[in-house]
Amino acid sequence: MSLQCGIVGLPNVGKSTLFNCLSSAKAQAANFPFCTIEPNVGVITVPDERLTQLTELVHPAKVVPATVEIVDIAGLVKGASKGEGLGNKFLANIRETDAILHVLRCFDDGNVTHVDGSVDPVRDKEVVDTELQLKDLETVESQLKKVEKQAQTGGDKDAKVLVGILKRYQEVLLQGKSARTVELSKEEEPLARNLFLLTTKPVLYVCNVDEASAVSGNQYTEAVKAAIKDEHADMLVVAAAMEADIAELESYDERKEFLESAGLKESGVVRLIRSAYSLLGLQTYFTAGAPEVHAWTFRKGMKAPQCAGIIHTDFEKGFIRAEVIKFEDFMHYGSEAACREAGKINIEGKDYICQDGDMMNFRFNV
C-alpha cells in the first residue's frame, strides 16, 4: 500500500540522521540548515516477531515482510506559509504524505547549530505548527467562500454540512490550534478528508534526545509532553545519534549488547517504524506455506474482499469466502491442516472485517 509518513521539523534537528537509520536510502546528514532539499523516500521493513515465528514454523523458500514508506522532507522555517526559505516545496511535499513524524530537538550540544540559536522544542513545534495552520486557514477560508454560495443557492445537503465543518476548522485555526483537534461525525469525515488539510494528518512527535536521556527522557521531553496533552497525538523518545551508532554494528548480538548497555530492550528505530505503521492506520494479515510466508499490509477496517484484492484484483472481483485462522491458533496447532481438524478455521463472508494478525486463505472464482 503506497502510504507515506513524512519526517518534518526545523532544519538541523536530526531528521536526516533518523532517516539514515531507518532506511538504506541514505540522505545527506550535515551540520547546517537545508541539508536535505529534495525529499528522500525510503521503503522500510516493519519489524514483526510474528513473521519470525511463522518462518521458524513453516520454513518457507521465501519471506516477504510488511513495509512502510518514509519521506525525509526539507527543514521548514518561519514564513514558510508565505514562501520563505523552502516553504512552498516543504508544504507541497508534506501535503502528499499521509501522516507526519515531527522531529523535535531535545538535546544540548554546542557543536550542533540550531537555526534559532537555542534549544526549545516547544517553540520549534509551534513554529512548524503555525506555518501549517496558516496554510490550512488560507485553504479553509478560500473553500468557505465557495461552499457558502453553494449552500445558499441550492439544496446541496453536503454543501451545508461542509460549511459547518469549515467554520469549526476556521475557529480552531484562528485560535492557533490544529484542525485535527476538531471532532467529526462519521457523516462529516469523508467530506473533511477531501479538503486535504495539513493539520488534519495524524502526527507523532519524535523527541530527539542525547544518549543519557534515551530511556527516561529529560526536561525537554517533559515540556513537549505537556504541550501536546490536548492534541490527538503521541510522542516517542529516540536518541538519533545513538541509533546511528547502532546501525553501524554488523551483527545482531553486537546490537543487542549495545542496547542492553544503554538500558534499552529494543532500538528506537524499531519502535519508530512500528509507530509509523500504526500512525498510518495499517495492520497486517499473513499467508503462510512452504513456497512463501508473506505479511500483507491493509488499512484498519477493511473487509475481506478488499484485503483479498491486495494480493490480486481477481481475488476481490471473484471473492467467494475467506478462511480465517487466528495467529495464536496457527502457532499452537502448527499447520492449516491441524487447525482444520481442530475446528479452528472460521469461514467468513464479504462483510468480515479483517483483524491484525489473521492468517488468511481466500476462495474466489472469476
Image (cartoon, helix red, strand yellow):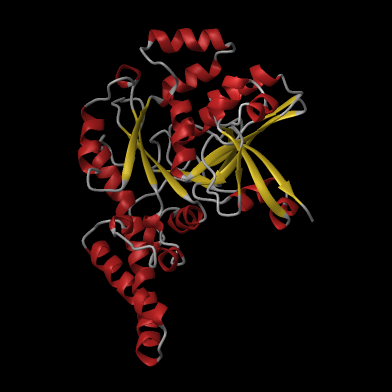
Residue 129 in view (yes/no) = yes
- Tell me residue 50's x, y (percent): 56, 25
Asked if residue 162 lies left or right of residue 170, the reply is right
Image coords of residue 228 (percent x, y): 25, 43
Q: Residue at x 49, y 56 (%)?
A: 89
Please say whether residue 52 is visible from this viewpoint: no
- Residue 317: quadrant of the picture: bottom right
Q: Where is residue 254 in the image (x, y as percent from the top left)?
A: 52, 8
Q: In which quarter of the image is residue 251?
A: top right
Nearer to the camera, 216 or 81: 216
Q: Determine the residue located farthest toward the right in the rendered image.
A: 366
Count of numbered circles in the view = 0
Q: Which of 156 and 57 lies nearest the eye of the viewer?
A: 57
In the figure, 248 relative to 156: above or below? above
The residue shown at (35%, 80%) is 160
Instruction: Work out which quarter of the rendered image holds the C terminus and state it.
Output: bottom right
Asked if 345 appears above or below 188 in the picture, the reply is above
Residue at the image position 48 percent from the left and 17 percent from the top? 245
Q: Position of residue 53 (x, y in %)?
A: 59, 20
Q: Is 213 displayed left or right of 15 in the figure? A: left
Which residue is depicted at the point 69% across and 52% down? 320
Please name whichever residue, 341 or 301, is drawn nearer the observer in this view of the structure: 341
